[in-house]
Structures are given as structure tokens and as C-alpha cells.
Image (cartoon, coloured by chain):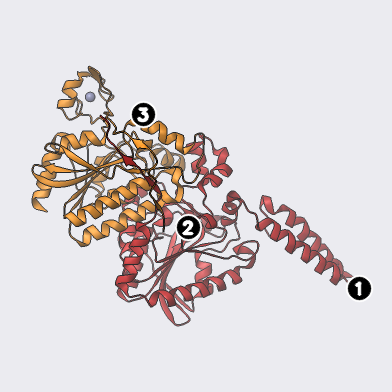
Amino acid sequence: MGWFKRLKEGIQTATKHKKEVPEGLWFKCDECKETSTMKELKECFYMCPKCGFHCRIGSHDYFEILFDNGWSEMFEELQSFDFLGFTDLKQYDQRLQDAYTKSNVSEAITVAQGKLNNKSLVVAAMDFSFIGGSMGSVVGEKIALSIEHCLTKKIPLLIISKSGGARMMESAFSLMQLAKTAALLTKLAKSKIPYLSLLTDPTTGGVTASFAMLGDVNFAEPKALIGFAGPRVIKETIKQDLPEGFQTSEFLLEHGFLDFIVPRDKLKERIDNLLEIF
Amino acid sequence: MVFLEFEKPLESLYEQLDKIKQVGQEGDLDVGPMISELETKIQKKKKEIYGSLTGWQKVQLSRHPERPYTLYYIRHICDLFIELHGDRNFRDDKAIVGGLAKIDGQRLVILGHQKGVNTKMRQYRNFGMANPEGYRKSLRLMKLAEKFGMPVVCLIDTPGAYPGIEAEERGQAEAIARNLFEMAQLETPIICYVIGEGASGGAIGIGVGDAVYMFENTWYSVISPESCSSILWRSWDFKEQAAEALKLTADHMHEFGLVDGIVKEPLGGAHSDREGMAATLKKHIKQMIRELKKIPTDELIENRINKYRHMGKFREIVTSVEE
Ligand SMILES: [Zn+2]
């Protein structure tokens, strides 16, 4: 099938990495409302220095936290486009343009290879700032390529999920990415290459219902929203309020769908320990 | 007969036909010519209406209250069917049915979403919205098929996996993800048909196959037109537009290469000739099994994974760093 269109249509300059956390001198925590300096926040791995609340961060922040020094990004050349001519209140192309400007990443997932305490690792990390971290064709393809790369090089794979689900503007193409990523993961499993799945706030919909739940080890950051259906949809369906703590990392751990919860300042060490054993 | 909004022109024609038939029964008047004239008219009108259905109209047809569901097909296709219940873990999900079957001597496992045929049964079947145990029951049956070398047939007809508190507690996402993973490498042929609604994860959760077909008047999408309207248009009123934008019809899906083909329905939809539709499906299943059985298992799985591997559309741009 000729889906892979090679369109050399323009030059894109390398994007400067912008943090999801606003720049500035001061940080006011959404959770405890306390104020800290940005420097303190950054030193605490973007966890509130006062209460430990995990701020949403982007792919590059995770790379910085996890990799020893430097990393090389992969598959940056892949770009989404509006092949269905999808227009709701906005054209999909316009949404993409807005996302490029607003988020400064080129897709909802960025893949990088580097060393974590001297161990090779491929990390595919999602960015919520890019159309809600939604999974369309490019996200699926980048995951597929990451898996194939890990297969060839025999390197473990870590996927950091952060997504509202499948990207509606690519309709069934997005839906098929669930099957595509899951199918490719079977190859990784057969080759006995470890696949670690980290779920962060929020991970819902088609991402949870595919690769995010299929890790050899599934783990999450504290208090992340994780689920299949979004809380609003559930509330509308059952016409009741949702219980306290519903669909949090802690809730999933309790119900047996996570192996453990790990705070961000212990993340690198924990992954290192896992890689030590696998 | 139930007529949908766009079928109203047919309703009056059928009413006329009934009246003439009555007149014919009551008197000696020869109504034969009038009947055949009306029947020609109806046929012409049907071709006109069903030949140019919009996306939303097909969505409505896929939900037609008289449309046959999974158990209807199973009963009309299989010489033998033993329903198997339960996921061996929590309970039996009534929104997905399945079991061991025989079609003209061919053993197989057949399963699918089941909607209720009346108000009471619709609730009993949870409107065809499965909980995690439904997907886990399906997987159990598929593994049984694999073990005993039987092909699997999945009939898809769901408005979505059930969004409820307990569904989340029991891991709706994990159940669907697990099925996608296991179905990708199941060592036996899998044949899937969208027989009605193909909504999102709830559909694909039993929808990974070597041959995936859609009935002519069905839809398959990442989200229902109503939910899409509510999220992207921030109102429930744009379902028609959403249905068009999502390009969710069998024609679109086949054109995109996301399904392998389309199964023709009788003029007027599957419900207008239920037995005919079942016969068509039976023939199709037999043909698919015949073809897929010839392929060695390794090759079958490799082809299956490759098929999904190539789904997706994107551009490749040349990146140059300008500092
Ligand atoms: Zn705080």
C-alpha cells in the first residue's frame, strides 16, 4: 500500500525545545497553591517542592531527566497532514499549524535514543501540548519504527504515555494505530526485548487501550489520570458522581493494572534497576 | 415495518400497495397490473434512496431496529452451535456472545457483540456495549480455537465499549489492549465482519483479523458521530456533519485500505431480507475460511501484522538545521 508518501516539500528548521511548564521566576502550585521558585521546581524534577505534585512536563524534560548526557532524536521527519480534509469548527491543518506554534514539538510523540546510567535505551515520550497528545498516524508510525529500531539494535524500549486518546481528525486511521502498535509489540515480545510502559497524567482512550497497558512492566507517576473512558463520558453515562480517587494511578495500582507507582525523582533510578534485571 | 426518516417516500408506496392488495382480495377486480406497476415504482424508489445514502443515513441503517444481530446470523448460518459462557474470571458478559460451531462440516469459533431485540433484552445485552469480561471471554474462545485448529469469526456490532465505573475497575483498556496483542499473533485464521456499528476500541477489541469485511450499510470509526459532534463541535447537533467528516462508511474504509472488502446487503439494508443476508454471510465465511486455510500459519501471522504495520498516512519532510 502506498501510504508512505515521500514529499520533500519545504524546509523545516529545527525546533527549539520549549517546556510545558511556564518559564518565569516563580511557580505557583495548582494543588497546594504554594509558591516556589522555578529553580527549585526544576531541581525537584518539576514536582512541587512543597507538596510533591507532579507538573505535566514534555518529552524533552523526560529526556533530560532520564538520559546521562545528550540523546539523539529519531524519526523527526514524519509529519501529520490533513489527508481526510477533516473540518469541524477548525480545519485539521489549522489545528496542526496551531500545535506547531503553541507546543514547539513536531508531533504528539518524540523518540530519542541515549544512555541511562550507561545503559542504552530508546524512549518514546508523548507531549500533551500537541493536540492533547492524541495518537494519529504519525504517533503510530513513530512507535512502530521505534519498536523496529529496538528489534534491530536489541535495545530496551520505554514509552512514556500522556494522551487524551486517538486523534479524531484522522478517524479510523487513528483507530487502526491501536492494532498497529499492539501488533508490533508482539514482535518485541517474541524477541524478548524489554518494553517498559510509563503512564503519566493523563493517559486515556486509545493509548491506554493499546501500547500503554502492554508493557512487560506498567508503572505510573503518582496521581495521574489513567483510564479508558474519560471521566466526563462516564459521568454522563451513569448519571452519578464518580468516587474519590477514581481513575488515578493509585486506583489502577489497587485494581491490579499497574506494577508500581514511582515519583519522578526516583524514576531514573527505578528504570535503571529494571534494566539491571531484564 | 419501521421506516427511517429518509425512507418515508417508501412508506406511502407500501401503504398504497397494501390497499390495492386488499381491494383485490375483496372484489373481482384484477389488480395484478396495478400491483406490478407499484412494485416497479417501489423498486425504482429504493434504488434511488439506497443508491445515494449519506454517511449519517448509513449510520441510521446500521442501527435499524429490525437489523439482524449476531445471534440471528449464528442461528441461520450454523448447523451446530454450542454457546460458551464466561471469562473464567469475573462473570459472563451478555453484550458479547460466542461459542463452538459448525458450518457445513467446518468447525469454527464464532463470536460477536449482541444487541437486544426488545426493550428488556436491550438492557440485558447492555445495548451491545461490552465490559472487560466480554473481551476476555472473546479471547478465551479465540485461544480455544487456536488450540484446536479452528478458524475464528468475529461479528462486530457495538456503539462502543461500556464506559462505566466497574468497567474501569476491571480494566476495560487492558482487556482491549490484550485482545489486540493476542489477536495479532493468534495461530489460526481470524475473519471479522462489521455487521452494524463499529465504534472505536469496543469494535477493534474483537476486530483484528486476516480478513476484515464491512457490511454495506455499516460504519467503522474512532468515535461515534454523536460523540465526535459533542467534543469537536461542542454540541450534539452536528452528528450529520461529523458522520461526513469521519468518512466512516464501508466505501470509505475500503478505499482507505483499512478493511479488506465490503459485503453487499439486500436493497434496503440487511433487515429487508434477513435470510438473504444470512445466506450471503454464510457463503462469504465459507469462502474466506477456504482461502485462509491454504496459508501456512507463520505466513498468515506475518501477513496479518504487516497489514496493520502499513496502516497510517503521513508525510516525510526534509529537516535541515539552520543555526
Ligand atoms: Zn504543591
- Residue that sits furthest to the bottom in the current view: B105
Residue behind mark 1: B28
The chain drawn red is chain what? Answer: B
Is residue A125 visible in the rendered structure shown here? yes
The chain drawn orange is chain what? Answer: A
Q: Nearer the viewer, residue A178 or B134?
A: A178
Kind of element beneath mark 2: loop
Q: Give x and y (percent) for residue B204.
A: 41, 56
Ligand 1 within 8 A of label 2's CB?
no
Ligand 1 within 8 A of label 3's CB?
no
Residue behind mark 3: A102
Chain hosting mark 1: B
Label 1, label 2: how far apart the Cα atoms are: 50 Å
Q: Give x and y (percent) for residue B168.
A: 34, 47
Q: Give x and y (percent) for residue B115.
A: 51, 59
Q: Mark 1 is on which residue type?
A: Asp
Residue behind mark 2: B125
Foreground label between 2 and 3: 3
At label 1, counting other C-alpha atoms closer than 10 Å, the crowd grade (few under 14, some 14-19, many 20 or more) is few
Q: Give x and y (percent) for residue A88.
A: 51, 37
Q: Nearer the viewer, residue B2 or A35?
A: A35
The vertical placement of A219 against A278, above or below, is above
> Residue visible at 60% across and 57% down?
B65
Foreground label between 3 and 1: 3
Label 2, label 3: how far apart the Cα atoms are: 45 Å
